[in-house]
Amino acid sequence: VDTRKPDFPQYAALGLEFTQKVIKTFPTDTSIQKIGCFSARKIATLAQKSNTSLDISSVMLPILDAQSLLGVQIQKDSLDTIWALMGMKWELRPEELRELTVCTVETVKMNSGISSSGRSFRGDVVTSGMAVFADIFAEPVHAVRVLGMQKVERVIELVLSLIYACLDKFGNHPFIFSFGFSVLQRLCNVNDCHNLILRFGGIVAVIDGMTANGGNANIQEKGCNILRRLAAYHLEIKLTIVESDGVDAVLNNMMTHSANEAVISEACSALSVLCVDKQTRTFIIQQGGVLLLENAMEIHIGSSLIQENALDALCLLSSDADSEILLTSNIITSIKDSLDNHIEESNVQRRGLSILRNFSLRDEKIKSSIESSGCLDNCTKALEMHTSTPNVIDSAFSIFLHLFNRSECQKVLLRRGMIELIVHAMMANVQSQRTQMLGCSLLCALCETPHSRVIVVDACGLEATVYAMLTQFSSESVQDKGCRILSCCSLDPLMACYSEELNPKLVDTILTAMDNFPDSVKVHENAVIALRNFASYESNAVILRPHADRVANSLRKSVAKFPNECAARANDTLKLIRQNRRK
């Protein structure tokens, strides 16, 4: 049959309709039922290959009826056929889905070897039934809503009972584990099902199932996914997974399937969720967890997803790890390689720079390692490539701030165009309070020296500062750092060239900061200094004149509130204003 022909859907529909009539006409003839099931399976397989959608309801119900009449004789054939038909993704009506679920539960339970029916275990029938369950919950939210929690509970209990039965009595049946894990994995998308999975021993069943099928990549991938989903939101569940040797299962998984991208991605993600407390993190490090993550990042250097998940895990593992452990590992090199190979991936950049930001708060050896590895260049590239991504910019700014006093960092910051990048990033993220706070802190540090102060002024650093103060008027830190930048830069003669455009905004911004934070000594002290320095240039007299009363009023309030810090400079400022007014 050529499924590419345009008339294939029509012939397939006719074939399925004929098969349905035959099955319905001879419900008690075992041979005809088997042939009918084979015919329906063949049509379903061809339809799936051609992505043809057919109404499976008409043939599925007669198959279920025949199964009820003939029982064990066609159970395997009927379940295999239903599984094939379900693969066409036809949405069954609610009553059909409920009937299918009840019938499949009864059939699987009858052949499970653990029911009161007295029948022995039939692995082939159970496997087919588990496959049908997996397809029933292909759309888990819809299926749970249609079936109701009572029927869903029966399925979860049966699936987990069979996994335990295979572990304890019937030997290893990889397909039962695989399809059973698919059911659990899909039901983990429904919050109401979490407690049911936990109540029926889902954690131990999954971990023991992974251990029994260590060489099966499909089972390992699904197992890690289930553990991650169950542990995602509850501390107690995370601890239970750890105590049930879940960490060992994940680490063994990473060793056995190091080349499998899908498995490693889920394993890294599960490991990051399970780094719940210091004791667990220490255990993971002792078991070689950092080395396994570094190895995964190296082998799968082209996978941005693995880089993201591995960096998440490394961030948590390294949070309180001993510095000597970090120095003897290749963790900084691995992070740099990840950043270099995924420079356009903002998620990788955010995660990698976040770890480096944490490291930049560590001891001098770690800081030296960051510098010598060239990671500051990655910060520069991040500013260039991800200017509009606040989380990336924030981490890069923080690293520069933490390493500011180191010679290599100074060289990087004073490279041509570097301060322009900082200013551009601030302007592109003007609504982000954290970005403005860190950016102002960085410009403030740069303004401490005359040489870099000139570069800041030339790079429109004052404009960025003013906009930061105007948009983040509620942030004391931004106002404090902003006033300090303006106080430093207003010492520079270059300020005079901004008189017509910038200076009116500058004066208003300083006065607004003083009004908004009447109790902040830092804001007022730096604001008074900025006004004094600003008033010291005769060219600014015209700018100050419209604000003279407001300036005088603000300065008097500063003196009254903070006499020791502000009185002398405030009086100097008022004197300068009077002198310039006379001139």
Image: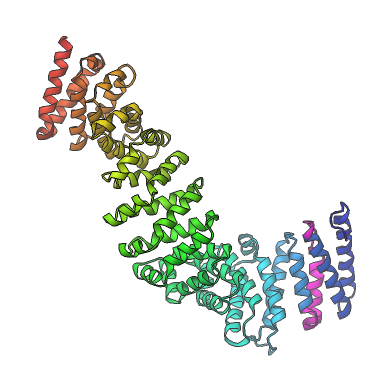
Can the viewer see residue 191 in this picture?
no
Q: Quadrant of residue 400?
A: top left
Asked if residue 522 is positioned above or below residue 153 in the image, the reply reads above
Kindly identify the residue that appears in the image at 31 percent across and 27 percent down.
457
Taking the image as shown, residue 365 lies to the left or right of residue 338, namely left
Residue at the extreme top of the image, as rendered: 583
Q: Position of residue 104 (x, y in %)?
A: 70, 74
Taking the image as shown, residue 435 lies to the left or right of residue 11, namely left
Q: Which residue range is magenta in the image?
A: 49-75
Kindly identify the residue that appears in the image at 50 percent across and 77 percent down.
204
Q: Position of residue 245 (x, y in %)?
A: 45, 76
Residue toward you, 39 or 360 = 360
**What kind of secondary structure does the magenta stretch mostly adopt?**
helix
Q: Quadrant of the N terminus?
A: bottom right
Q: Quadrant of the C terminus?
A: top left
Residue toward you, 18 or 532 = 532
Kindly identify the residue that appears in the image at 81 percent across and 62 percent down.
46
